[in-house]
Image: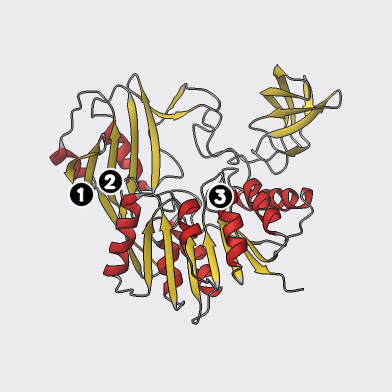
Amino acid sequence: MEVKIEKLDDFGRGICYIDNKVTFVPNTIPNDLVEIKITKEFKNYNEGKLINILIPSKKRIEPKCPYFSKCGGCVLQNMNYKDTLEYKKEKVTNIFKKNKLEINPIVIENANYYNYRNKISLKVIDKKIGYYEPKSHSIVEIDSCLVASNSINKTIQLIKKMNIINGLVTIRCNKNDEILIIINSKDKLNIDVDSIKEKIKLVGIVINNKLFYGEDFLYENINGIFYKISYDSFFQVNPYIASKIFDIIKENINSNETVLDIYSGVGTLSLTASTVAKKVIGIEIVENAVLNAIHNAKINKINNVGFLLNDATKAITKLNLFFDKVIVDPPRAGLTKTVIDTIKKIKPKEIIYVSCDPQTLVRDIKLLSDLYIINKFYIADMFSFSYHVESVCILKINNI
């Protein structure tokens, strides 16, 4: 079946129309003339498979990744980098338009859009190591990952010699190329630490949440602040873009302000804010992350910040303090209703909302819109060549 791809959907799939019915075709881009096969038919849409590119779009490029057509990660690698940024800007703008909200985003480019990730998680099934194919549990076996750091890619080769039959392997690194390996597996492993240390800067190995060798954390330095990152703590996967988001935080906080950081993790945004603010309080539910945050404040000699170990929804209802500004960096599910209601009760002058999902972001902004309006909006390319978007929205209280 011959079709022309009209546009991309929010997941980076090409869209065409067959008998006026929307049809999604992965690995295609706008203006491709392609041969496809319908793989699934639903009431309101079809799913298709690319069979052959008849006339490629003028904007199509050859993906550098050898696993592009199989792996579901970097689905935009068949476009040049500037075009992926335009896609993301248009995607987020349209999501807001559909919800009757206008934005004019400032786009922050990734300085290194290959080999930028400081963390990857690999599946191991029957000794095959790699990523899942889209919507399946079939493994795309890989030797390296084009968006992972070079030190991580060196480590993948060493993982293959550890006799892992089934399990999950997470590899983390820092800007000094120091490596932390986290393995979850029931297999009897073959780990030669001395041999591994000859190849990479090994800091530690954690197996089934127990320390096997070295340390169970890394240190990272971003914008002059040191962070201790435990093996199970969240940290931004893209240090360059993280540094730009931290700059945005600093630019939007004043020296006389008290700040609340909800979902504070290892303290990245709290400590950044504390370099400007009068006082900062962070709330986080992961114990190791809070211990890291307290340690991070100490090693950076920052005394105007405190951290609470608690569920954000429960903790902020107990805080009897006024906050000039609130920072939120929630998981993909966005803010809970209790958090939103409590923020509206506190009525900070501004909310700095860091989001990895524009759909939940726009939902939450609408729930806040009776008190707040959008003041500034940024799209930061945290996840280059994927359809994922990191946004920073500055909301200010509407005094009209």
Q: Which residue appears at 43% of the width and 66% of the height?
A: 281
| Marks 1, 2: nearer the viewer | 1
Q: Distance between the residues labelled 3 and 2?
A: 25 Å
Q: Which of marks 1 and 2 is nearer the N terminus?
A: 2
Which residue does the image show at 67% across and 69% down from the upper left?
397
Q: Toward the viewer: 287 or 47?
A: 287
Picture quadrant of residue 59: top right
Q: Do the residues labelled 3 and 1 touch (CB within 8 Å)?
A: no
- Answer left or right for 39 relative to 120: right
4 lies above or below 238: above
Q: Name the residue under label 1.
A: 215
Residue under pointer 2: 180
Which element type, helix, strand or loop, lies under badge 1?
loop
| Residue in the foreground of this view, choosing between 239 and 51 | 239
Point out residue 96 in the picture as x, y percentages from the top left corner: 73, 52
The residue nearer to you, when weighing 36 against 234, is 234
Look at the picture and state if 58 lies above or below 221.
above
From this viewpoint, which residue is outermost toward the bottom? Answer: 256
Q: Tag 3, which secondary structure?
A: loop
- Give the percent coordinates (x, y) of residue 139: 44, 24
Q: Callout 1 environment at 10 Å: few (<14), some (14 to 19), or many (20+)?
A: some
Rounded to the nearest angstrom, the CA distance separating label 3 from label 1 is: 30 Å
User: Disc 1 residue type?
Assistant: Glu
Q: Do the residues labelled 1 and 2 touch (CB within 8 Å)?
A: yes
